[in-house]
Image (cartoon, grey):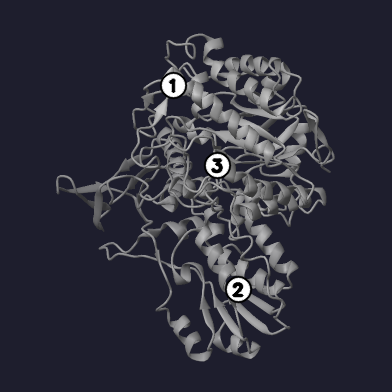
Amino acid sequence: MVEKLMSPGKIGKLTIRNRVVMPAMGTSLAASTGEASDRIIRFYEERARGGCGLIITEITRINDEHGVGTPNQLSATEAFQIQRLERLARAVHRHGSHIFLQLHHPGRQTSSRVLGGKQIVAPSPIACKTVGEVPRELTTEEVEALVKDFIKGAVIAKTANIDGVELHGAHGYLICQFLSPATNHRTDKYGGDFTNRARFLTEIITGIRFMCGPDFPISVRIDGDEFVENGVNLEDAVKLARYLESIGVDAINVSSGSYESAVTIIEPYSYPQGWKRHLAQAVKDAVKIPVIACDAIKDAEFAEKLLQEGNVDFVALGRAQLADPAFVNKAAANRVEDTRPCIGCLVCIETLMSGKQLRCAVNPTLGYEAEYENVKMDGNGRPVVVIGGGPSGLQSAALLGKRGFDVTLFEKREHLGGSAFIGSIPPHKELLNKFIDHMEFQAKEAGVKIITGHNVTVAEIEALKPVAVFAAMGGDPIRIPLTDGNILEAIELLETKQQFAQKKMMIIGSGMTGLETAEYLALQGNEVTVVEMQKEIGPGLYAGILFDITTRLKKMGVKFIPYHKLLDYKQGHAVLLDQFSMQVKPIPVDHLVLSIGIKNKKKDDFILELKEKFPNVIMLGDSEKPGRIYEAMVSGWDRAFTLEV
């Protein structure tokens, strides 16, 4: 039961229907003008319909000159943006939810590229190590003008019938840069001691109070700990929270980190639920106003536990509501199996940081809510066969079943999950098991007949007389000719859970599978080396995920050899080519493990035979084009959604 989670709570004089907050997460779904587009309105409305009590919008800029954080970002800088913001507010309100606009300026945590070539700005000319650009120090007059920009943003929000605002004073953005001793070295009235460093935020808050009145809620997001040298620590955060309460702030939203400690903001899969709950607890113990906090929370039961133990007043559930917009309603109805879980893969932030719109690996309709709202219910009991029970196969089967087709899914293995099952075997990957269980539940709920442990034949498929065959059989490992044929494949090694001890293991390829295999083997007590042909380890991997796993691997003594090419494996030696010096290096190895990728099955004999027998064979996932879970889920959803027979 989640009684406390579903109970109403108050922020200022505003009553929120439950204790669930959707915290601000960038979407890049707004119009190029900064207006609330139909897409971003539909995105937020879906979470309101799903039961969320309070939605806090993505970072909303208050300055168009040097305050741009992401492409297609919401903006509260001009009066013409009010009308679309009002439509957003109404879309959320009609489902019983409330909405705050999060007002934001990135300061030094943006780039000149995003600003059209203009130099980035900050309280002091200190570069963010992640961004790598030295900012221009804001003049006193410019800071005073920015105070007015924040106040204007709040006035725009109130005029648009938005319920309140949140000031983003965390994550190393501009307000945080003024608050933090690490980034504020000013000598004017906005720098120096605590009072002066907090002056920028103080003037914003008092200005909003004057312009918007005492009943307009103001929340401030703060860092419980920046996790950077000389930055804001927990003692500083508690002091700030008390001060903010004293000047009339209505709620404190506790988070952590900056771009230089980004894994503490949006945690990878290895971080357990509640790992930073001590930050919120310390703040809550110090103030009487409501405390909101995010804490890598993945399930409603843990959220309830935090509330029951008095850790927070409101629980921020971000990625959980990206993965499943109906998370809250399902929690209230105790529909745990039917809730699609976040798997902590960071595809969401990875796509945003690369300039794309927000994505979720397990939710293919995120950002496309309107396009996929009307599912055709035209299956009429006609048979369809799905071959393969990985993510793309299960997704297509579930949607086809929902459409009314008579779906039979065949999986040659005894278990479902495909590549996701293999991915669940390395350490810290338990969330993938929940994802597989959920996909199986949804398929069965849609009436799909699932047959595992059976390598289906063309004759058996013919007997079912399907109107369409979906081939979701996964890809094949890429192999290279080597003298010694006794080579291990990373995928097979993980799937069969092979065990080794005190062996010299060399992994060729530092993609995610290669690195996870390295961790799997290192924990067994082996001496592990990872070889990569590219100049950097983990080519193409998101920096947060790469940093997380390589940090653990280095602690376990795993060695990395980038920019080396495997030439051969013979007589117990891996023969490597150093692509810097062009020298050949034979290295003694007990076992060589290949993790160099997979290829599609377009030329597979079974696929070719299917295409000869059936007019409507549809390739899915890695069978069509190797990719990650996101690509597999999109493939499965789109092909099932658009099937016309």
Rendered location of residue 312, percent (x, y): 73, 29
Separation (CA) of disc 1 from disc 3: 22 Å
Circle 1 crowding by C-alpha within 10 Å: few under 14, some 14–19, many from 20: many
Task: Say whether marks 1 and 3 touch (CB < 8 Å).
Answer: no
Rendered location of residue 157, percent (x, y): 65, 38
Kindly identify which numbered label has been placed on residue 26: none
Q: Amino acid at mark 1?
A: Pro
From the image, state whether disc 2 or disc 1 is nearer to you: 1
The N terminus lies in quadrant: top right
Rendered location of residue 205, percent (x, y): 63, 22
Task: Say whether marks 2 and 1 touch (CB < 8 Å).
Answer: no
Separation (CA) of disc 2 from disc 3: 37 Å
Above/below status of 186 relative to 44: above
Marks counted in the figure total 3
Separation (CA) of disc 2 from disc 1: 52 Å
Q: What residue would you read off at disc 1?
A: 123
From the image, state whether disc 2 or disc 3 is nearer to you: 3
Of labels 1 and 3, earlier in sequence is 3
The C terminus lies in quadrant: bottom right
**Residue 170 in view, yes or no:** no
Secondary structure beneath dot 2 equals helix
Secondary structure beneath dot 1 equals loop
Q: Amino acid at mark 3?
A: Ser
- Quarter assignment of residue 52: top right
Q: Residue placed farthest to the top in the image?
A: 193
Above/below status of 349 relative to 206: below
**Residue 402 in view, yes or no:** yes
Q: What residue would you read off at disc 3?
A: 75
Q: What residue would you read off at disc 2?
A: 640
Q: Which sits in the foreground, 598 or 75?
A: 75
Q: Amino acid at mark 2?
A: Ala
